[in-house]
Amino acid sequence: MSEPLLEASGIVKSFGGVRALRGVDFAAHPGEVAALVGDNGAGKSTLVKILSGTLAPDGGEIRFEGRQVAIPNPVAARELGINTTVAAANLPDVCWAVPVLILAAVANGVLEEVVIVGYLLTRLRDLGWRTWHAVAASALLRGSYHLYQGFGAFVGNAVMGAVFALFFLRTRRVVPLIIAHTVLDVVAYLGYTLLRDRVSFL
């Protein structure tokens, strides 16, 4: 078998007292399709985030084309040709699939806009932050938790966060933001579900 294109050895990662990865080994060879399979909480997403530069490992090493490399951020990962593409979950063909996707979109919209825009901006302004500093903090926070989707998702969500933050500071209304966010997610979720078998790049 050929030398692995990407290889991780002895990867360790902890979050406080919780050990997410304990000496994990992983290898992907050229032209190979590899799958990470495991229960919820097994550490699959944590390993992917480490390999794509979103998280730093506490121990172990990563090799690319046989040489040891550091992947401190998604930009460094992208320079190596490593990126994370998130595909929506494939729900079974049942009557409740679409309502579940819509409810998930509503939940995301409410959570992000109430917390990241409404609450955060109100608190930062109460603490005396300048407008642009508060807008930047809200936008960067929104973008940062989409880094697992790649650098493009970070930039897109940060820009969206800045626009939404400015709208909130101007109008003091969060409901229009929840509606806009929900519509975006519904289109993304249902669009993928309805078009994945018809459009090749999905």
Image (tube, grey):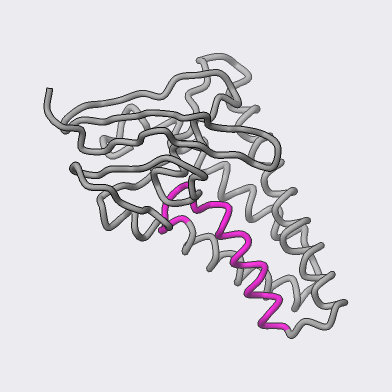
Residue at 55 percent across and 65 percent down: it is: 158
7 relative to 112 in the view: left or right: left
Residue at position x 74%, y 48% in the image? 111
Q: Residue furthest right?
A: 126
Left or right side of 88 for 66: left
Corner quadrant of residue 115: bottom right
Name the image quarter holding the C terminus. Answer: top left
The relative height of residue 141 versus residue 93 in the rendered view (above or below) is below
In the rendered image, residue 184, in percent from the top left (x then y), is placed at 56, 50
Left or right, 146 with reference to 50? right
**Residue 68 belongs to the span the image colors magenta:** no
78 vs 89: above or below: below
Q: Quadrant of residue 175?
A: bottom right
Q: Compared with residue 156, is residue 42 higher up or lower down, i.e. above or below?
A: above
Q: Residue at x 49, y 50 (%)?
A: 56
Q: Is residue 134 magenta?
A: yes
Start and end of the magenta stretch? 131-153
For the residue pair 60 and 3, the one nearer the viewer reads as: 60
**Quadrant position of the N terminus in the picture:** top left
Q: Tell me where residue 43 appears, x and y as whole percent.
A: 53, 30
The secondary structure that most of the magenta stretch takes on is: helix
Q: Position of residue 79 (x, y in %)?
A: 27, 58
Numbered marks: total: 0
Q: Quadrant of residue 14?
A: top right
Front in this rendered view, residue 180 or 120: 120
Q: Position of residue 190 (x, y in %)?
A: 51, 35
